[in-house]
Amino acid sequence: MGCNIVMLGPPGAGKGTQAGPLAGSRNLPRISTGDILREAVQSKTELGRTAEVTIARGELVSDEVVIGMVRERLAREDTQAGFVLDGFPRTITQAEALDVMLADRASLIVLKITVPAEELLRRLSARRVCGQCSAIFGDGVAGSPCAQCGGPLVQRNDDRESVVRERLEVYARDTEPLTNYYRERQTFAEIDGAQPTNIVRRSVEAAVGRLQGAARRPAANVGASE
Ligand code: AMP
């Protein structure tokens, strides 16, 4: 039936940091719409040229474009056993489209990572990422080598403070409403992301373990007679 996971939460909450090991431990693909868009920007495809300015401003790329990207990615065979979505959905329209795409798969496990706003600002301005493999470092020094692949650490353009503020506002306006969209589901869990990374990791694994049973019984939620 597959283990279909969505990581929700504001920028800087640790979605990417947690999605990597979670996907790795279960041998599932991690699908980060931010990474797909940044790759498109780097390779200067048509999609990349359209998305570049939007990303640099901290705004959202259009639902139509992002939904198309995810639909294409989820059609690939390697998602049949499940996936970890990181950074999608970000709007109600995207969430509705995702539900339609997954109508015949196991229910989504939705993990929302919460972190206080002032901590998000602090984390994002300190964050460095590998320009080569996209690994995330909470306090790396720009230019120093990535511990995973040796590539150079850089600050993301959109991690500059003025853009971060815009991203947090966009999150509050467009993405936070997803909490209510998913909250009533039996396969939703909220995780305290202000704890140390390894503790958050344990909470994430425990939540997935707990919710997997409910996710395998989607028919029970839609009026199957017992
Ligand atoms: P992220 O790496 O997830 O923080 O994404 C970086 C940027 O890519 C975001 O600030 C948006 O501009 C864009 N982006 C990523 N995912 C989405 C999405 N699901 N919908 C719209 N824009 C997105």
Image (cartoon, rainbow, N blue to C red):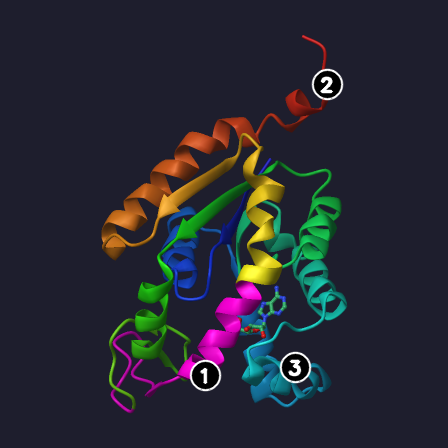
Q: Whole-Å distance between the Cαs marked 1 and 3? A: 19 Å
Label 3 and label 2: CA atoms lie apart by 42 Å
Q: CA distance from mark 1 to mark 2?
A: 48 Å
Taking 163 as reference, is 191 above or below it? above
Badge 1 crowding class, 10 Å Cα cut-off, few under 14, some 14 to 19, many 20 or more, is few
The residue that disc 2 covers is 223
Amino acid of disc 3: Ala
Quarter holding residue 133? bottom left
Name the residue beneath numbered marker 1: 162
* x and y percentages locating residue 216 in the rendered image: 57, 29
Q: Is residue 192 left or right of residue 46?
A: left
Label 1 is placed on what type of residue? Ser
> On the rendering, which quadrant does ligand 1 occupy?
bottom right
Total numbered circles? 3
Q: Secondary structure at mark 1?
A: helix
Residue farthest to the top, as pictured: 226
Please say whether residue 80 is one of the residues in the magenta stretch.
no
Label 3, ligand 1: CB separation under 8 Å? yes
Q: Give the mark, 3 or 2, whose residue is nearer the N terminus.
A: 3
Q: Nearer the viewer, mark 1 or mark 3?
A: 1
Q: Residues within 10 Å of mark 2 (few under 14, many from 20)?
A: few
Point out residue 171 in the picture as x, y percentages from the top left corner.
54, 63
Residue range in magenta is 143-171
The residue positioned 43% from the left and 59% from the top of the image is 15
Task: Provide the residue designation for mark 3.
Answer: 51
Give the residue drawn at x 46%, y 75%. 165
Residue 175, horizontal then vertical, whole percent: 58, 58
